[in-house]
Amino acid sequence: MAKLSLDSLTRSYGDLTVVNSVSLAVPHGEFLVLLGPSGCGKTTTLRMIAGFVEPSSGSIHIGDQNVTAKPPWKRNCGLVFQNYALFPHMTVAENVAFGLEMRQVEKSEMGKRVNDALRMVRLDHLGHRYPRQMSGGQQQRVALARALAIQPDVLLLDEPLSNLDAKLREEVRIEIRELQRKLGLTTILVTHDQEEALTVADRLVVMQDGHVRQIGTKRDLYERPADRFIASFIGRSCFNEGVITRSGRFETEDGLVFKVLDTGASGPASLALRPERFVIGDQAHSMDNHFTGTVEFVSYLGSSIDAHVRLGSSTKMVVQMANRDGFIEPSEGDALTIGWAQSAGLTYPRNQGSISQGGQVS
Amino acid sequence: MVGQGVQSLSMTPSSAQTQRGLTASLLIGPATVFVAVSLLVPMAILFRYSLNAFVPGKFMVDALTLDNYIKFFTDPYYSSVLLRTVRVAMICTVVCFVLGFPLAYVLARSQSRFKNLLVILVVLPLFVGNAVRAAGWMVSLGNKGAFNQLMIGFGWIDQPIEIMYTEAAVLIGIIAVNLPYMVLTLQGVLEGIARSTEEAAFSLGATPLVMARRILWPLAMPGILAGSILTFILAMNAYATPALLGGPKFQMMGTLVYGQFSQQNNWPFGGAISFILMTATLVLTSLSQMLIARRYHVS
């Protein structure tokens, strides 16, 4: 039985539907990430789970309880906000104790539980401090301790790392992940940062325009993006436009024919290829597809090197090459043979009006 | 101006500091001089007057006596005016807070595109001068005023309700003037309290009432204090409203001062009353400030 389930959850403001029939089942102990660009409805979904936004229709269950009509203070959700939202007039210990006071935990037990929660985030020595006397990373850990102290049924994290600098973000991210594993907490994290999403998530939910686009593990999303949007949003893809002429055959606008993964679809489509799936040089000849093109642009990224290779008047590929020992990168203007497997070519039927330049990477 | 930044770099630290000090005094100078000349000097003169004697027929006579102050505190009539003033000011402050806080909260949390319009509506009463507004109240609250005519017309009352020239009329008048000050001060402070702070409390199990008491109230305390002090000072020193709505028999400290200066020509006693009013206001506000600051650790 799912710990948290959303059933056709919808929220509209007038004519605008910000969350459109979202259904999810989150098993006990899962770390689920709601991922999407700003305005995709992920935050509204989280706020409906927390009880701050009333759904227009649909229902929310925590455990076997229908909480759709319950106010936030009766839901037992631990919440961590982007801006920490600590109570500035209370010490760190008082902040953590607040939720326990609301639950009328006995004084004798309270001290221990506050201490336990603070020890989990390694701040038990700073209980007497006020939030303003702490760094952003410490404040966010206090907020986490405060949310954990109430032993929530579901832990909800609303872009908790966005206000931290890169190094701290990494640190707190790992801390959240380890605590979540240790405590077996069902957790929902909302973020627009795909790297953050990919490092912590058991499963991801990609949202766009209020709809769930795809639910799956990192591997599912990366290997088999459900649509063009996800192919561009999760990791990098280079896109070329053309037509699926028959099963497994894609013809570009400039007349090149590629073997692609057969999806059963036909007609105008976009071809998405991951830049690291290309092989170059002699090895390329043994691949399902191999073409020789001109290197137009090389960009040195450190661990890897990107080469933009033009295959035809409108067809361009972005090829990522590992920067191995003794690797000599191609120069601009060089001829380069590239090859790729049929199964690497993912096609997406093209919608009207979303035609883009060949070789576009996003 | 363009070269100034470069120039100050090459200067020795001490001369740079001198220049900064000079700039600072240039910035605060004019206002300070204006306040000193227009407020402190007249007050010093007034205080000196309050120590003079008043001889009927000869007006003010040079002296150095506390008689005016003694007269105020020994005559029950005058002390009762002071008490009434303090009482009216306190009632106004409490009512302004009770009415103003919910309004300020709604304004602070409003995300409506009409928010600016709402704020203007709150400030609108201040667009009308005190005297004009009081005249309006006189027209509507009098025995033959719109309010009583309406009530009698509907048959809800037989006799007009006496509102004009009572303390109630003065209270209504002062509250109407002071409410915007309270609302605006509170709104500013409440807007500084992130909505997520409240939501955090809710998610931890606090009901709205508990949240208001444990989170909103202490965090808004600096604003509650500032708004209350502002309202209290304004009410203590009200003149036009008590003069017009309270009538000649209803005296507050403001009207008393005016009477002594312009009707009795008793400048020394008028000066003494002014200083008693000022001291009472100062003492009461600093006392409440201190008490609340200690209780809620605000500064």
Image (cartoon, rainbow, N blue to C red):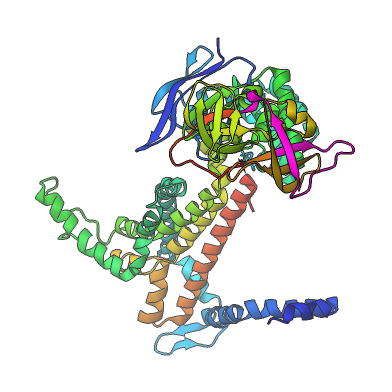
Nearest the camera: B224 or A121?
A121
Quarter in which the N terminus of chain A is drawn: top right
Pick the front one: A14 or A254: A254
**Position above or below: B155 against B49:** above
Relative placement, left or right, of A38 versus A321 is left
Please, which residue is most extreme toward the right here?
A326
Residue A6 falls within the magenta-colored stretch? no
Q: Position of residue B191 (x, y in %)?
A: 51, 49
Q: Find the residue positioned furthest to the bottom.
A: B58
x and y percentages locating residue A208 in the rendered image? 50, 34
B262 or B288, which lies in front?
Answer: B288
Q: Position of residue B135 (x, y in %)?
A: 26, 67
- Above or below residue A198? Residue B43 is below
Residue A275 position by quadrant? top right
Q: Pick out the residue farthest to the top.
A: A1
Q: Is residue A325 above or below residue B253?
A: above
Whether residue A134 is visible: no
| Magenta region, residue range | A319-345
**Quarter of the image where the C terminus of chain A is located:** top right
